[in-house]
Amino acid sequence: NAGVTQTPKFRVLKTGQSMTLLCAQDMNHEYMYWYRQDPGMGLRLIHYSVGEGTTAKGEVPDGYNVSRLKKQNFLLGLESAAPSQTSVYFCASSWRTGGNTEAFFGQGTRLTVV
Amino acid sequence: AQTVTQSQPEMSVQEAETVTLSCTYDTSENNYYLFWYKQPPSRQMILVIRQEAYKQQNATENRFSVNFQKAAKSFSLKISDSQLGDTAMYFCAFKGSGGSQGNLIFGKGTKLSVKP
């Protein structure tokens, strides 16, 4: 019963490098989200998806791209990493938006850009 | 746009005592949902309790209860009989009724320390 799994758990990048964070959920959820967590800032929504093949911008989308080619996977890409993208990244999924449906979170990815 | 404010960056409580964490929010919607999430040092986000705005009765989950004041747009979390395992960051979150308004919006969090 894996729930939401994020890969990798930790990563160090040099400025200008690219990488992709993978989120996989096995609950057949339609909705998936990427958040970033910074000290004193709470969690802020980067991008989200309301179904396979769809993506939408959240509060802080600049510098990130996403893809949802398969319902169970939601990828977050950094094309040219910057130190300002040093953060902890969380993926989440839910059955639907709205309502009191619970969002399930992965364990987070700690990314450091040097 | 909706906003969520947690005015207490840090709090501490003695084991077995009661503590209340504050949360206020701003919205023009009438139907919405409120949540408290716990984030222990493991980083895992854990749902503690949820409240539907159209329900007047305050939600309760074992030692956790809320004081939901819709007119005041206030949603505080009360932890009774605090335990060492309650030490964590606590996030208040708002979710609207659907569409792009249905995404979770988080406050900045309150760091709770339970002291033995």
Image (cartoon, rainbow, N blue to C red):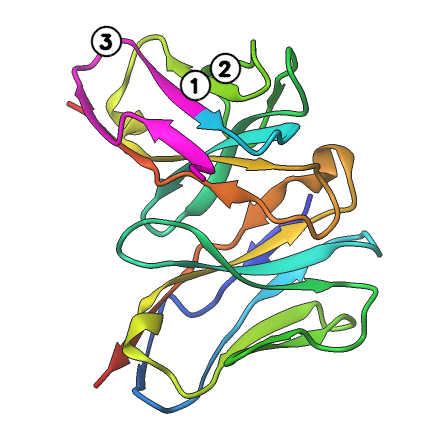
On the picture, is B52 further left or further right than A60? right
Q: Compared with residue B76, is residue B6 higher up or lower down, i.e. above or below?
A: above
Percent x, y for residue A50? Answer: 67, 25
Percent x, y for residue A10? Answer: 22, 30
Residue B75 picture quarter: bottom right
Asked whether B62 falls inside the magenta stretch, the response is no
Q: Which residue is mark 3?
A: A17
Q: Which residues are magenta?
A: A1-23
On the picture, is A46 further left or further right than A18? right
| Point 39% across, 32% down: residue | A5
Percent x, y for residue B79? Answer: 47, 80
SS of the residue at dot 2? strand
Q: Which residue is mark 2?
A: A66
Kindly identify which numbered label has been placed on residue A76: 1
Q: Amino acid at mark 2?
A: Val
Residue A6 picture quarter: top left
| Point 78% across, 72% down: residue | B71
What separation in Å lies between label 1 and label 3 (alpha carbons)? 14 Å
